[in-house]
Amino acid sequence: MTAFADHDAYIAAAPEALRPLLVHLRAQLAWALPDAEEIIRYDMPGFAAGGSVIAGYGAFSKQCGLYVSGGAISACSDAIAAAGLKASKTGVKFSPNKPIPDDLIAALALSSRKELGV
C-alpha cells in the first residue's frame, strides 16, 4: 500500500481518466471549506477542521468517491438521487460519465461540517 505525502501525490497516482475529477473535487472542497486543512488520513486525501475530518475523497479503478458524515448524506439524499448518483451511508460514487455537481459537493461538505460542529 502506498503512503501519500499530500493531495498532489494522491491525484498523480490515480487512474489518468479520474485525475481531472479529483482536481475539480479538491478545488470545490477547498472553496466550500476555505479554513479547513488539507490532510491525508488512511491514505486518502481530505479536509479537516478542529481535529475532525469533514470530507474525504478517493479514486478507484473506474470511479471516485466523496466521503462525508452520515447526516450529510441523509440531508442531501434528494439531491444525490436527482443527480442520478449512488450513495452509501457516508459516501457518494461518481465517474467521468456522471460527475458530481458542484452545488452538491458544497452542500455535502457544509452539511458534514455542520453535523460535526466544526
Image (cartoon, rainbow, N blue to C red):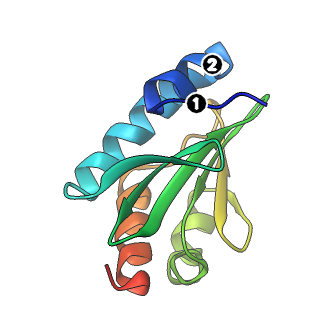
Query: Where residue 4 is drawn, which disc sits there?
Result: 1
Q: Is residue 81 above or below residue 12?
A: below
Q: Residues within 10 Å of mark 1 (few under 14, many from 20)?
A: some
Badges 1 and 2: C-beta atoms under 8 Å apart?
yes
* Among the 4 quarters of the image, the one containing residue 110: bottom left
List x then y, in percent, for residue 112. Answer: 44, 74
User: Is residue 105 toward the left or the right of residue 4 in the image?
Assistant: left
Residue at 51%, 83% (x, y): give it: 75
List x then y, in percent, for residue 41. Answer: 57, 51
Q: Is residue 80 above or below residue 5?
A: below
Q: Which residue is mark 2?
A: 13
Q: Is residue 85 above or below residue 99?
A: below
Residue at 44%, 41% (x, y): give it: 25
Q: Which quadrant is the N terminus positioned in? A: top right
Q: Residues within 10 Å of mark 2 (few under 14, many from 20)?
A: few
List x then y, in percent, for residue 93. Answer: 68, 51
Residue at 61%, 79% (x, y): give it: 70
**Three-letter code, disc 2:** Ala
List x then y, in percent, for residue 61. Answer: 79, 28
* Of 83 and 15, the residue lying toward us: 15
